[in-house]
Image (tube, helix red, strand yellow):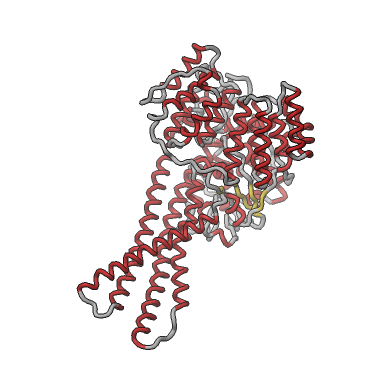
Amino acid sequence: MSSTSHAMNFFEHQDRAKANTRRFVLMYICAVILICLAVSAVIALIALFTIKNPNSKSVSPVLAVAAVAAAITALLIILGSLHRIAQLRGGGSVLAHSLGGRLIEPSSKDPGSRQVLNIVEEMSIASGVPVPPVYLMPGERGINAFAAGYAPGDAVIGVTKGCVDGLTRDELQGVIAHEFSHILNGDMRLNIRMIGMLNGIVLLSVCGYIMLRATPRSARGKEGTAVILGMFTLSVAMIAIGGIGALSARIIQASVSRQREFLADASAVQFTRNPAGIANALRRIGGYPKRARVLHPRAQEAGHMFFGKAVGSSSLRSTLSSHPPLKERIIRIDPSWDGTMLEPLAAKDAPSRPQESPRQRLNRIMPGARTPGMRAGVLPESIQGILPLLALSGTMTPAHISHARDLILEIPQELKDAAHDTFSGRAVVYALLLDRKDAAVHESQIKHLETSGDPAIADLVQRISASASTMKPELRLPLLDMTLGSLAQLSQEQHTSFRANIEALIQMDRAVDLFEWVTIGVIKRHLDERFGLAKPQVIQYYKLTSLGHETSVLLSVLAHASAKDPDAATKAFELGSSTITGIDLHLLSKDQSGLDPLAKALPPLASCSNRIKQSLLRACAVVIGADREITTTEAELLRAIADTLGIPTPPLLPGQRLV
């Protein structure tokens, strides 16, 4: 089967898994409704036996009491859920800390930590998402990992000490690719909400226990006895119903998790084209006495978020299992598996793991292939075949990962080291924004940093500015991405000052070029998400009917940026607009379609449904690919547009053809 066929099967599997997930979530809602009905039924029975002189008219108050009980139960579950979700509103970092995770500093020199950070960095640049902070769970010896957050902008990756020490680089890459699938497929938000939803149902049992302890042990008279009996009955019923509800919720939660784990496994293979990586990681879990167990007390509520089964015996085949059986997962990845497991690497073996160059790895996975990043137009047909336009959204390929690694290797070490530090990461961004043509503007920018910023940072900016100014243009965005993980650790005050300095540096030459426009957009979108300054996008449009002008601006900007003359711009625009039906589009002049009009057009387009966004992104790719040549300017512009639309998009490769 060809690579293209594999990709198509992958997306078909993704659609089926999402459909199954919607059904399971509906089942969860039904379980909550049944719990409310069960509580109201118990209350109704208690009311019937406690109302004096029951008659035909007493049915109405009984029903009213039952309805109030159902409403109170629903309110209790909702408030319990919202309370736990509110505790997690800080995103992935809050959950990582609650599980005992410790941030791995981006500047860490520890070999194991450095290897994890390098893999995460490669995956981020290859997929077009911000580089997420990585948390290590130092006391956990089981082999496990997780991704957490509400959106790619506030996502984190967590790994156990056993995962870092016990896996080879390829296996660790397979695990990280699995977690990136959860980031790209939007699983994280649902996973956090599930923690809250489960907490709400469990709260019903907790209230039952509290009421049971508060029930008096003795009473005077028949009325007092009836009250005690009613309280005791209601307490026991709440404990029982809450327990059954929690059991049902866990079954549904596990079912949703199993479907998404299969999808994430398939995605990891799609991303790396190396089934042995993730399959062997699973085999090492099976061959390790500690398996994937996580000992932290909160592991139970977050068990569905982990790579492997974090709680209980991983050999347990049960409807309560949060993950599919290891053997089933391995066979789906490698049907020829012989049934043997692997022992994890000894800690002493970790430093000696062989490191492959990007070209060696790509040649091993795809014999005869050439490394992306070489002379344009030389990509073999085997790689072109796995780069359909549909792969632009929410995925990556081995070619993208290899290309990202090439880019990282080309960035001067001085700048990479600075990007990995919270203090010097700001200096890297400032250095990228310094004016390279006008010495007077350059000097004004440095003076501004000395007076409005930190003088030490201004000195560092001057020291690294030479490396930043001579760096290839195509390396600027990857370097900017590399700073995001360290910049996310700024304090709120530091972030505010950093944002103000960026805008001041950009405005000093009284003109905003493409890279400056992209930079401020990336910083605003992703760091603002982490600092709670960005509001989540709400879908307002399911059709482009009322967004004809905005769509015309979008495609016109790209047409003028990619074309060498007016005729070429017209042809590129027509090709792109032909992929969007049901709306009249017109090529606008350069004055009507510059960066300022584009900045105004993108917010409403970002409020479209994902289906519309994907069609827009595809049209954009057709426009810039009309001349069969992808320039750095076009790639940066497409990345910025996709980023604003909220669609993680891998970088276009040199020589990539549109199919």
In the image, 125 versus 343, the foreground residue is 125
Horizontal and vertical percent position of residue 256: 44, 51
Q: Is residue 559 visible?
A: yes
* 585 relative position to 104: left or right: left
**Residue 42 image position (x, y, % from top left):** 33, 70
Residue toward you, 535 or 265:
535
**Left or right placement of residue 215 versus residue 108 in this view:** left
As drawn, the residue found furthest toward the left would be 56
Residue 363 appears in view: no
Vertical position of residue 303 compared to residue 476: above or below: below
- The answer to which image quadrant residue 77 occupies is bottom left
Q: Nearer the viewer, residue 134 or 450?
A: 450
630 vs 433, left or right, is left
Quick check: 642 above or below 489?
above
Residue 112 in the image: state x and y as whole percent.
Answer: 69, 46
Residue at (38, 22) in percent of width and height: 584
Image x and y of residue 322, in percent: 48, 55
- Taking the spot 36% from the left edge, 77% from the top edge, the residue there is 230
Task: Please tell me which residue is depicted at 60% across the width and 29% down the height of the picture.
Answer: 517
